Amino acid sequence: QQPVQSPQAVILREGEDAVINCSSSKALYSVHWYRQKHGEAPVFLMILLKGGEQKGHEKISASFNEKKQQSSLYLTASQLSYSGTYFCGTAGSSNTGKLIFGQGTTLQVKP
Amino acid sequence: DTGVSQNPRHKITKRGQNVTFRCDPISEHNRLYWYRQTLGQGPEFLTYFQNEAQLEKSRLLSDRFSAERPKGSFSTLEIQRTEQGDSAMYLCASSLYGTGELELFFGSGTQLSVL
């Protein structure tokens, strides 16, 4: 089943923070986060494996709560370049190559 | 490393025609995936290969769709008797399975419009 992302859309000013949530009804092995700009390919941000780890990438970090089957992406001190659509993709096992993506969260950062 | 390459970038066809798309993955990647994306939605899994073996195909995928990866390098996705509902962006991705790397590298996609 498709994971549910919230919110559907966010508008920020430069320097503000945002949180994007991803929730699944199925047990998860991993959660993947991608960002896609209009007309471009999705670009990998990070992967979180079950174990509840939190990862960071510059000012973008994420957490994964495997018990709740939820992941959150944290964007701090947002920059104009952060604008785009963010997708979470979930995998139920380590062996599968299949990701089930959420419907996306559109983030717009304004000057 | 030139990334994942997809051809053509755009394809316009009439309903009922057959179309074929090509994907060239990153050369050392052993897994190749096809996804479909419609406007405002996330990518939807279609099928994937490990080397030349097709390991999984979406149950939602019509029999009109077929994919091959004959020598474990490039892949083709063919849609027979296209329908207007097939209009979408078809994305290819590749990954290097077995090294602990799980990241998918996506191509820029082929935009299909069925008239």
Image (tube, rainbow, N blue to C red):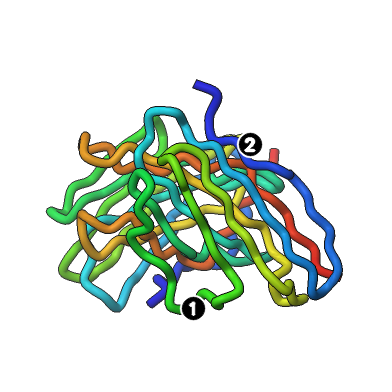
Farthest residue to the front: give it: B70
Look at mark 1 in the image and give the residue it sits on.
B60
Q: Residue at x 43, y 71 (%)?
A: B58
Q: Is residue A61 visible?
A: no
Q: Residue at x 20, y 55 (%)?
A: A94
Q: Amino acid at mark 1?
A: Leu
Q: Residue at x 29, y 65 (%)?
A: A70
Marks 2/1: CA–CA distance: 38 Å
Q: Amino acid at mark 2?
A: Leu
Query: What's the chain of the residue with tag 1?
Result: B
Q: Residue at x 18, y 48 (%)?
A: A53
Task: Categorize mark 1 by other alpha carbons within 10 Å: few (<14), some (14-19), many (20+).
Answer: few
Look at mark 2 in the image and give the residue it sits on.
A80
Farthest residue to the left: give it: A51
Secondary element under disc 1, as helix, strand or loop, is: loop
* Nearer the observer, B90 or B30: B30
Task: Categorize mark 2 by other alpha carbons within 10 Å: few (<14), some (14-19), many (20+).
Answer: some
Query: What's the chain of the residue with tag 2?
Result: A
